[in-house]
Amino acid sequence: MEEISTAITQPVILLTGCINPEGMTFTKLTNPEIRRLQYIETINFYLDNTNNLIVFVENSGIDISETFQHSAHRARLEVFTFIGNNFDKRLGKGHGEMIILQHAFQHSRFISSNNSVCKITGRYKALNIKPILRSYEKYKCNVMVDLICQLKYSDSRIFIADKTFFTDFLFSTTDLINDSEGYYLEHALNRAVLFSIMEGKYSYLPFKYKPRLKGQSGTDNLNYDYSFSYWFPLNIKQIIRFKVFSRKLEIKFSN
């Protein structure tokens, strides 16, 4: 059995899940059994490929914790399920995901005993998760996330942040999220990041490496292209962008 202390100084990996979307707006992948198997596969991926503590929170009341009872990594895993998908479905899955994050912060002892969280949408495997986590730990920023579309949108599939970023900035945007009105979790996350920077207490960096995500989009039921040939040129651009951005920060703070 693994000791929890092996991962305590690293970000907790928080995986969000909804096995039965029950008519959620803008959700084409609705088969509960397919989604259940995808979540199990993804949890096992992070257990096998990281040493981090892992928290999985599911909001449709379907418990998969027994699947991992005999896992060699079970000491590093917390599994929660609750009934949190009974809100107005027109608000969309982003609203539900924010409720999941709040539930995790209220109930996870892993999160309560750690300082940072790597949030990942629960059916996506970040194939390059190790270098992503290493770069976050190396550069010691408060928030690492990709801000795109001229700072109007943030990629919410994966981001890493201090625990206080969630409690002080992100959670307060929950009531703004309404997919039917075109305000998504990605907008709320972007708003929270910008406000945290404006307050002057939080440092931000984009990802040094392009997350190489393998998974099926719940929105349109399409698989992401995670092939090396597709990802590699995007990753080169990401590394260059990161170097330029971090260099500008060095110049700013040296003046």
Image (tube, grey):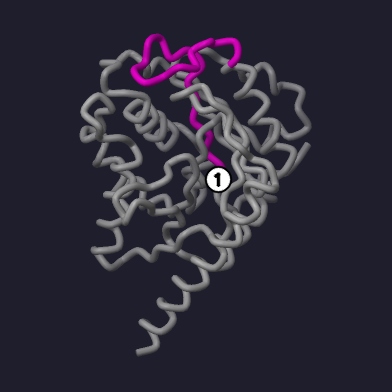
Closest to the observer, 82 or 159: 159
- Camera-side residue: 250 or 242? 242
Q: Is residue 91 above or below residue 194?
A: above
Q: Is residue 168 visible?
A: no
Q: Main secondary structure of the magenta part?
A: loop
Q: Horizontal and vertical percent for residue 164?
A: 37, 52
Q: Nearer the viewer, residue 165 or 110?
A: 165
Identity of the residue drawn at 41% across and 78% down: 248
Residue 93 position within the rendered picture, expressed as x and y whole percent measured from the top left: 37, 25
| Quadrant of image for the C terminus | bottom left
* Image location of residue 47, percent across then percent down: 70, 37
First to last magenta residue range: 12-34
- Pick the residue in front: 235 or 23: 235
Secondary structure category for the residue under label 1: strand
Identify the residue shown where x is 24% and y is 28%: 178
**Residue 140 rendering spot, x and y as whole percentages:** 50, 66
- Three-letter amino acid code at the position of disc 1: Val
Residue at position x 26%, y 16% in the image: 88
Mark 1 crowd level (few <14, some 14–19, many ≥20, 10 Å Cα): many
Q: Kindly indicate the quadrant of the structure image that contains residue 69.
A: top right
